[in-house]
Amino acid sequence: MKQLKLILAILTVAFGVSCSDDFLNQPPLDRITENDVWNDKALTDAYLFQIYENMPWDYLKDFGGGAGFGAHRDALSDLAMSTYSWTPANNEFRPGLWGTANNLWPMDWWGYYNLWKINYAIENIEQAPTSVLTTEERNNRLGELHFLRAYSYFELAKRYGGVPIILEAQNPDITPQEELFPPRNTEKEVYDQVLSDTQGAFDLLPDRWSGQRGRASKWAAKSLESRAALYAASIAKYGSVQLDGIVGIPASDADGYYQIALAASQKIINESGHVLFNKYPNASDNYANLFLDETDDETIFMKIWIPFEKGHSYDLYNVPYSYRVDWSGSMSPTKQLLDSYEMLDTGLLPDEPGSGYDENNPFENRDPRMRGTLLTNNDIFQGLPVELWYGTERNGVIDAEPNTGVGKDGLGIHPDATKTGFYVRKYLEKASAPLFTKQYFSGTDCILFRLGEIYLNAAEAAIELNQESAARDFIEPIRTRAGLQQNLRLELYSGMDLRDRIRNERKLEMAFEDHRYWDVRRWRIATEALSIQVEGLRILRHIDGFGNETFSYETFDAETNKMNFSERHYYLPIGQGRINNNNKLIENPLYD
């Protein structure tokens, strides 16, 4: 049975995936035995490639029936709402009406199928003769597998807390019963295993894979160490220990984890050779193109997509309404996100005294990343202006008819149009004319680790260790690259205020990169940050007797139901089905 599963897995890779852009050319696979796989480098790599494919790390692909078509995990945060009212994102996840029965993708990921494959591959590659893999090749692949195992356990820990740690490929025929059904390890033990595997991966992996994009390098492993240690530190500092440590990490361990995160981040910044992307003179365009140009200067690790041949549907689901082939604008960004971008002239947030914010010109004089992330009224996208007004006022009469008064992308033009008054720009393909991208035709790579995050990790770890000067040193390059002009070192803030501005910087720099939902959970502020009434901006166009065009703006409640994040949602439920299969698994707190 094990051999049959292995052969089917290899055949799935061989006939379902083209790897010419990132891994290898497949050999003929009409007859495959288990022995063949581990005695052929190409087949071994095909096996590894399928593990990569099964990892839970691509936030660009559609989550289908989980959150709801085109509604990615950031549509479960305070960055955006799902445009479609009928989706589980709006009806279950955002109102907080979910528990063990709704433990589904895109939240849930119980990755032990992948972990079995990883452990099995480690055991076989460790025994590979030098006639198949040179010592360096064997070490590189073992490094990949330790990285993949670390990432898998990290994804489990950030969802469930402590989970069973299994480091061998179990076999029902020979594995003792008590090992087949192990209890949950503590959350601290899982994070420590992640950090152990990242160090092992770093020691074995190359700096770069020659001509093979999409494979993890040693700097991907060090980046995971930076991220995972930061998570562990946050949970230790801001969480609480429950179930004898199955969830939660002792507070006494917080500084140690922050130190690991800081040291790992510094090593990447100083030694990896990566630099912040800075190719375009316009700061908004530079930020937007960071995610489109697919360069290796800032990107440390990415998921490769091939347009037409092996593509995703991010553009199909997220373009403004008038640019659609089918669906559109699936994520409607919130006004709360818009209000998080500071004023360019002062370096202050709009609600801070003296910021210079003008409610009659809400999109002007803002952090350039705003227009690199969002599409606002009359922004040029794919050669045309994005028209977001809900109606046109002429001679005191408001025309709200779709063909005469409403902007072609505006509120009310169609159920597929924005529900908040703006759209996502980030990751959408650029062009001189509308692309009308079809399903699975998007080929933009998904960035999983980049140097910008590493600077932010270092800044956060430093401020949590009360190293304010160092925190400013790490945040300044990010703000300078963003095109900001004032308060570049956040000199106006200190203590908790500086910490909160560093957190806000992370929110903006990494918006729609699948960080925000997890960040507010690990900081234990999600019960506040994700329990809000989402706001939007109603834009009315005015045409005077001379044909001059002006706009007025009105804040409104964009979502019928207030978001609600319950205390129990800091951890996902294990679920009754898994407990039925292994009665040693204890359910997480508050899931009665």
Image (spheres, rainbow, N blue to C red):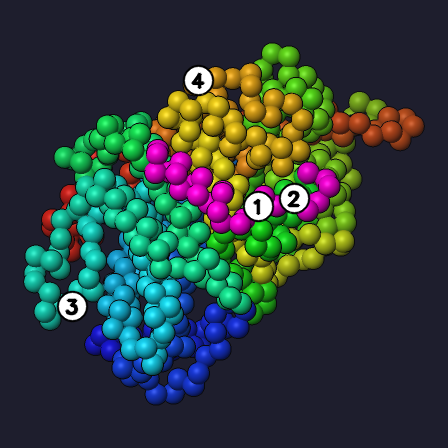
Kind of residue sitting beneath label 2: Asn
Mark 3 secondary-structure assignment: loop
Q: Of label 1 and label 4, which has the lower sequence position? A: 1
Dot 1 and dot 4 residues touching (CB under 8 Å): no
Kind of residue sitting beneath label 1: Val
Q: Which is more toward the observer, 311 or 545? A: 311
Q: Which is more toward the observer, 202 or 338? A: 202
Residue interval drawn in magenta: 258-283
How far apart, in angstroms, are the residues tagged by discs 4 and 3? 53 Å
Kind of residue sitting beneath label 4: Gly
Residue 389 image point, x, y percent: 71, 34
Residue 418 image point, x, y percent: 61, 40
Residue lying farthest top?
A: 353
Q: Of label 1 and label 3, which has the lower sequence position? A: 3
Q: Is residue 261 magenta?
A: yes
Mark 2 secondary-structure assignment: loop
Q: Is residue 117 magenta?
A: no
Q: Nearer the viewer, mark 1 or mark 3?
A: 1
Q: In the picture, which quadrant includes the C terminus?
A: top left
Dot 1 and dot 3 residues touching (CB under 8 Å): no
Q: Identify the mark at residue 278; answer none if there is no mark.
A: 2
Q: In the picture, which quadrant includes the N terminus?
A: bottom left
- Determine whether 450 is above or below 132 in the image: above
Mark 1 secondary-structure assignment: loop
